[in-house]
Amino acid sequence: MTEDDDRVFKALADRSRRFLLDLLFLRDGRTLTELESELEMTRFGVMKHLKVLEEAGLVVTRRQGREKLHFLNAVPIRLIHDRWIDKYTLQQVAALADLKAELERPMTTAKTVQMNRVYIKASAQTIWDAITQPEWTVKYGYQAPVEYDLRVGGAYRGLASDAMKEQGGPDVIIEGEVLEVDPPHKLVQTWRATWLGGEATTLTFEIVEKENGVCCLTVTHDVTGAPQTAEQVAGNIDGAGGGWAEVLSDLKSLLETGKSVYA
């Protein structure tokens, strides 16, 4: 078991921390005050639990004015599932499987912002290329090629894979426009799934270099006013893949081992 796995399992072992994840699943982007109001413990106690969840990568935060908002990050759950749940059927991991099912069930209220974060032992340039180059995108996730004109105002197109075309999908499944580009660290774009009626959303990739050749990749998807897209990218539609959590888990596997999780 890796240190990352160990931190996730320890974080999930506490009932109060699991309850905090449930709250963020129901509605993301909550302040400490909002979360504190749902638990019968001191503000300091809630802060301690949130710190453990952040250190395990299960919660990510961002500033909005004077407030600090907390978001559920499903990627570590996906990584644990891919590494352990599919591999073993021991009763000891049943609780984790139940948590994954809970996190992936359809939401009653669509999230307006979804944040996913993963740490990858690869250079920023390699991760950037894996996101923006078709020879990379066909190797992981939905295994579909992309086309980017990497300049402000440039076009983005996500093309259908052969499997998608066999199922009657359109040639262009996603389209958008580049809003901000700073290779290999930040890419902001619009994102419209053509088969969902073209709901307009905003997608941001941020790559931050850490120590020992590790980079932090954060994907923030603003799905305000786009309920169908919110369900799709959260992985809540049966038979339509696991959304961003699955894509990022697979990307990490590809860049660190040379193989897709599904190879």
Image (cartoon, rainbow, N blue to C red):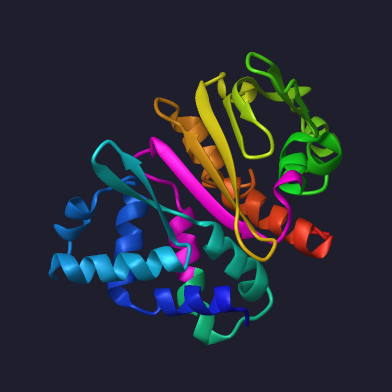
Image: 245 above or below 228:
below
Q: Residue at x 25, y 43 (%)?
A: 67
Q: Residue at x 56, y 19 (%)?
A: 197
Left or right of residue 231: residue 145: right
Residue at 63% across / 24% down in the picture? 195
Measuring from the top left, give residue 257's x and y in whole percent.
Answer: 80, 65
Which residue occupies the foreground of this view, 209 or 245? 209
Any part of residue 76 in sight: yes
- Number of on-image labels: 0
Please tell me which residue lies in front, 9 or 189.
189
Q: Quadrant of the N terminus?
A: bottom right
Q: Could you tell me residue 3's position as x and y percent? A: 57, 78
Tell whether position 110 is magenta. yes
Answer with the quarter of the image where residue 171 lies.
top right
What span is colored magenta in the figure? Answer: 98-125
Q: Residue furthest top?
A: 153
Check the image and name the residue furthest to the front: 211
Indicate left or right for 39 with 195 as reference. left
Residue 210 at x, y percent in the picture: 60, 58
Residue at 75 percent of width and 44 percent of height: 125
The answer to whether residue 261 shows anywhere in this view is no
Front-most of residues 45 and 142: 45
Q: Quadrant of the C terminus?
A: bottom right
Q: Is 106 placed left or right of 119 in the picture?
A: left
Q: Is residue 37 above or below residue 107?
A: below
Above or below, 159 relative to 220:
above
The quarter of the picture where residue 113 lies is top left
Residue 77 percent across, percent down from the top left = 53, 64
Is residue 168 on the magenta stretch?
A: no
